[in-house]
Amino acid sequence: MNPNDEKDLIKKAQKEPEVFGKLYDKYYPQIFGYILKRVADLEIAQDITSETFFKALKNLWKFRWKNISFSAWLYRIANNEIANYFRKNKKYSISLDKLKEKGFEPISLHNPETEFLKAQEELKKHQDFLKIQEKISQLPIKYQEVIILRFFEKKKVKEIAEILGKKEGTIKSLLHRGLEKLKELVK
Amino acid sequence: MRKEDLIKKLENIKTPEIEIQSHKERLKVALLSSGYFKEEKIMNPIAFWTKRLVPAGIALALILAIGFSVIQPKLQIAKAMEIAKKDPQIQQLMKDYGLEIKEVKLQDGKAYVLLALPEEKLPSGLTKGRVRGPGQFFIAYKDPKTGEIIETCGSVAEIDLKKKRVGKLELIGKEKINLPSLTEEEKAKAIEIAKSEPKIQEMIPGLKESEVDVKPLPPFKLRLDEDPDEGIKVIPADLEKIVNVIFKSRENEFVVTVNLTENKVIGIASISTGKIERPEKFQEEFPSQFSDDEKIIKEAVKLVAESEKIPYRCPLKLLGSKINFKSGKPTKIQLTLSCGEKVFEAKIDWQKKKVISFREK
């Protein structure tokens, strides 16, 4: 989708749910994938993804393209939610699965339980990733963000700067210091 | 390890590319039915048009000129919200059930504040209530004084603006909301939509032979309405008509949720026997459903007490509990217990009736 088309879509999405649905379909894999790489837990990733998109929807009317791209804005919201999770081990009231506590079982045309188990098995196969992610998660959040965006999300420094709302020089510095610290942990 | 080697390692690691389609779908439905689109437009019409159509100085003069008749009620509404938020009982409801103030209306010197779940906490049309059936939203509230189980969709607080206090706080039971009635045509349409959905035909064996019933769903969203005779009352805010089409056979019961406004199936729930109640018995069987949970918790506490995991003798006091369900059956119980001054967390495998962990918090 070219940027102008996306700008129109976002404007319409502020009023039309079906249009928001298209944006959601486009960005869900990216955002869920990023969150999963940050937390390495499927259930938590689902919860944080839910929270991210609800916040995005709630604040969509405030979004202005000139300040930040839509993708970077979504990553920013996801980052904030992940940071909240790490800081407070926050319970996400939006989690659709939390309704199970009250006896609600989410239903969809895909069987969620089998799918979830398959996804867990798939995640377990990525042992190299899980091991390094575990080390990365021991770093301060500011280093985790830049390392994962740079190496796992393959974002450029400029893109990372946009997402985090920092200068490119700061990002480079954080990457350098983060990698130094990670090196110590991986030793 | 050298930094260059670490960078190389990070660049070459194969990261998981996993997508959980069921979560994606459920979240999408929850988002699209959350109502943010309509609400955001309504929230800021004055600010929106003032910024765009009228220069600042004229805008101020205009607001002052329109002024008192618009601003005064707004001040009273703001005052009512402040009084409500300071009331301890309302604070407790907001804390325990996550209710928030949805709407305030003024009438005869009083303010009426509607408290209900925020949009993001409302179940989507695809969720199933273990007790009430699919797509239904309620808060199960146990009156701390009487022990009575109250099934409610929210609360309305009546606020005396002169005395600056909450005069009455009433839980809104479903019987106090006018449920949408269904015509025979609507029922027939709902059945037709359900039966002609290919996925439903695939999922429900013996579809043609099943007994069929159609029931309207209580609304997810509520709002206040001013009636000159009845005063302020609670009515549904949902624009769409959503119903449950219930297919019953000897072996099983399926509930298909149909959106009659959009003419489509939005979900299906398979109700296994045991914990899920049959639709016609929701009202009288809900209290016993809740007491089934209480029985489970009581038995779980007894298991912990008898497990010899507690380091010393003391009467156990239950501070909190959580039951995890799978396919309508309890699988794990989590208890928070106090023993004297110490607080413990216990986990019980309900299938094996065994305490699997016990630790001090």
Image: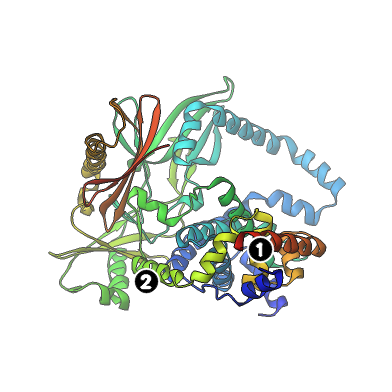
Q: For residue A110, which numbered disc appears in the image?
A: 2
Count of labels shown? 2
How packed mark 1 is, by other alpha carbons closer than 10 Å (few <14, some 14-19, many 20 or more), is: some
Residue at the left extreme of this rendering: B250
Residue B185 placement (x, y as % from top left) = 30, 66
Quarter of the image with the C terminus of chain B in it: top left
Asked if residue B57 shows in the view, the reply is: yes
- Which quadrant is home to the N terminus of chain B? bottom right
CB atoms of marks 1 and 2 within 8 Å: no
Q: Which mark is residue A183?
A: 1
Please name which of the two marks, 1 or 2, marks the residue nearer to the observer: 1
Q: Is residue A87 left or right of residue A115?
A: right
Q: Where residue A29 sits in the image (x, y, percent)? A: 54, 71
> Is A36 or B266 nearer to us in this picture?
A36
Three-letter code, disc 1: Lys
Question: Could you classify mark 2 by the number of other residues whose Cα lies within 10 Å: few (under 14), some (14-19), or many (20 or more)?
Answer: few
Residue drawn 36% across the image and 30% down it: B338
Q: Chain of mark 2?
A: A
**Which one is nearer the viewer's eye here, A78 or B310?**
B310
Labels 1 and 2 in the same subunit: yes
